[in-house]
Amino acid sequence: MTPQDIQHKADEVASLLREKLSVRGKTLGDQLGRSGAVLPRRVRAKGRLLAHAATVAEHPQLAKKIDPAAVLRAHSEVCFYLSEINPRDRRMGFVLVILGRVTFALLITGAAFVGLLVWRGNV
């Protein structure tokens, strides 16, 4: 496996992170650091392995120590996880959570207001 192949795989994962999770960053390592709890621990670890392999592949002597099978496994696992994510569903879920919180706050405020009116004898 050539350094260009490894860099291409890292770039592919970086573009998937940008597309599916809207994570910004110059390198794959930066993007994985910014992804935080959005990615599961094992996927983040595989991504770090891929980012490390991409940086090590730039050095001819260190590139010999890269395990190509591990890089391929990491690439396939991270790509599989990211390909299953639907950005539209993530956005809709976020909007629904916000709406649920606002609705709950209005419900509690209304109940407190009615309780106050009953307590003061206005109802």
Image (cartoon, helix red, strand yellow):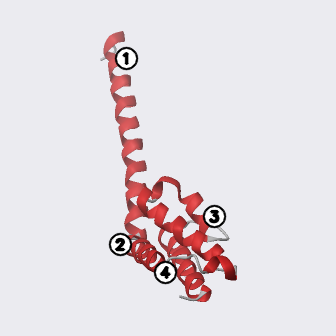
Residue 58 visible, this angle: no
Q: Position of residue 50 (x, y in %)?
A: 53, 72
Query: Depth-wise, is mark 3 or mark 4 nearer the camera?
Result: 4
Which amino acid is tagged 2? Glu
Point out the tag, 3 or 1, that comes first from the N-terminus. Answer: 3
Point out the tag, 3 or 4, that comes first from the N-terminus. Answer: 3
- Whole-angstrom CA distance, mark 4 to mark 1, is 69 Å
Residue 80 visible, this angle: yes
Contact, mark 3 vs mark 1 (Cβ under 8 Å): no
Point out the tag, 4 or 1, that comes first from the N-terminus. Answer: 4
Q: Position of residue 99 (x, y in %)?
A: 40, 49
Q: Where, quadrant-wise, is the C terminus in this rendering?
A: top left
- Whole-angstrom CA distance, mark 3 to mark 4, is 23 Å
Name the residue located 51 percent from the left edge and 71 percent from the top edge: 17
The residue where tag 3 is placed is 30
- Whole-angstrom CA distance, mark 3 to mark 2, is 22 Å
The residue where tag 2 is placed is 84
Secondary element at tag 4: helix
Point out the tag, 3 or 2, that comes first from the N-terminus. Answer: 3
- Single out the residue that lies furthest toward the top: 120
Characterize the local packing of mark 4: few (<14), some (14-19) or many (20 or more) Cα atoms within 10 angstroms. Answer: some
- Whole-angstrom CA distance, mark 1 to mark 2, is 50 Å
Query: Depth-wise, is mark 2 or mark 4 nearer the camera?
Result: 4
The residue where tag 1 is placed is 116
